[in-house]
């Protein structure tokens, strides 16, 4: 160990001492060393605290990130449920209007009438039935002459709008 002579009393003491153990005279290099040592220790402690704080912050960020994801998930689920219910209601309302059974009965009753008019060439009568407001929800596309009738309507329409010469 390095020894030093006290400037005040001449006693010998260790270099690492802050002051002379005999007279109490302050020893500057020792003080500085101790101070720097303490500073280093403090800094190490602060680093540890800093690391801990950073880890905590990371954990906190992870947690809050998870929270945000959970909230987003819940919101998305709610939207899906709401949209799903609305769609289901639409579907039920549409199918409540006329059940398949009712539609079939209606067709069995009315399609023969349409067939009769169609075969007689009374397209106006067919038109009146198909475009009657009270029949608007029925499935006329199931009628055997529906496509044929649409073609006839198109031709009639063309002859009315473009057939000045005919
Ligand atoms: Zn001394």
Image (cartoon, rainbow, N blue to C red):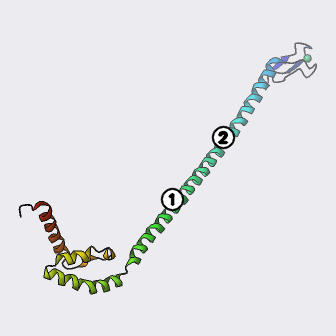
SS at mark 2 in the image: helix
**Disc marking residue 123:** none
Against 65, residue 81 (above or below) is below
Q: Secondary structure at mark 1?
A: helix
Q: Identify the image quadrant of the N terminus.
A: top right
Q: Determine the residue positioned at 42% across, 73% down.
A: 93
Q: Ligand 1 shows up in which quadrant of the image?
A: top right
Q: In the drawing, does residue 105 fall left or right of residue 145?
A: right
- On screen, residue 104 versus residue 166, left or right, reads right
Comparing 12 with 48, the one in front is 48
Write the residue at 24% across / 83% down: 111
Q: Residue at x 46, y 67 (%)?
A: 86
- In the image, taking residue 82 as reference, residue 32 lies left or right, namely right
Which residue matches tag 1? Answer: 76
Q: Residue 40's image quarter? A: top right
Which residue is at 16% across, 65% downward? 157
Q: Image quadrant of residue 165?
A: bottom left
Check contact, mark 2 vs mark 1: CB within 8 A: no
Q: Nearer the viewer, mark 2 or mark 1?
A: 1
Q: Which residue is identified by label 2?
A: 51
Q: Quadrant of the C terminus?
A: bottom left
Q: CA distance from mark 2 to mark 1?
A: 37 Å
Please state the horizontal and vertical placement of residue 33, each as a whole percent of the image.
77, 23
Q: Is 139 situated above or below 155?
A: below
- Mark 2 is surrounded, within 10 Å at the Cα level, by few (under 14), some (14 to 19) or many (20 or more) other residues, namely few
Q: Earlier in the sequence, mark 2 or mark 1?
A: 2
The x, y position of residue 73, in whole percent, is 53, 58
């Amino acid at each position: 160990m390095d020894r030093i002579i006290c400037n005040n009393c001449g006693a010998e003491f260790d270099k690492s001492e802050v002051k002379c153990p005999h007279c109490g005279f302050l020893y500057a290099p020792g003080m500085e060393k101790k101070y720097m040592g303490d500073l280093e220790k403090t800094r190490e402690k602060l680093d540890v605290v800093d690391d801990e704080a950073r880890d905590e912050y990371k954990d906190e960020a992870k947690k809050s990130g998870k929270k945000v994801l959970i909230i987003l998930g819940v919101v998305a689920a709610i939207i899906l449920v709401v949209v799903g219910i609305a769609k289901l209601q639409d579907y039920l309302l549409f199918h409540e209007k006329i059940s398949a059974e009712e539609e079939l009965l209606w067709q069995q009753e009315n399609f023969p009438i349409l067939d009769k008019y169609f075969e007689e060439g009374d397209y106006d009568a067919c038109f009146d039935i198909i475009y009657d407001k009270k029949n608007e929800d029925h499935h006329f596309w199931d009628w055997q002459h529906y496509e044929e009738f649409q073609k006839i309507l198109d031709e009639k329409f063309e002859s009315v709008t473009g057939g000045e010469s005919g």
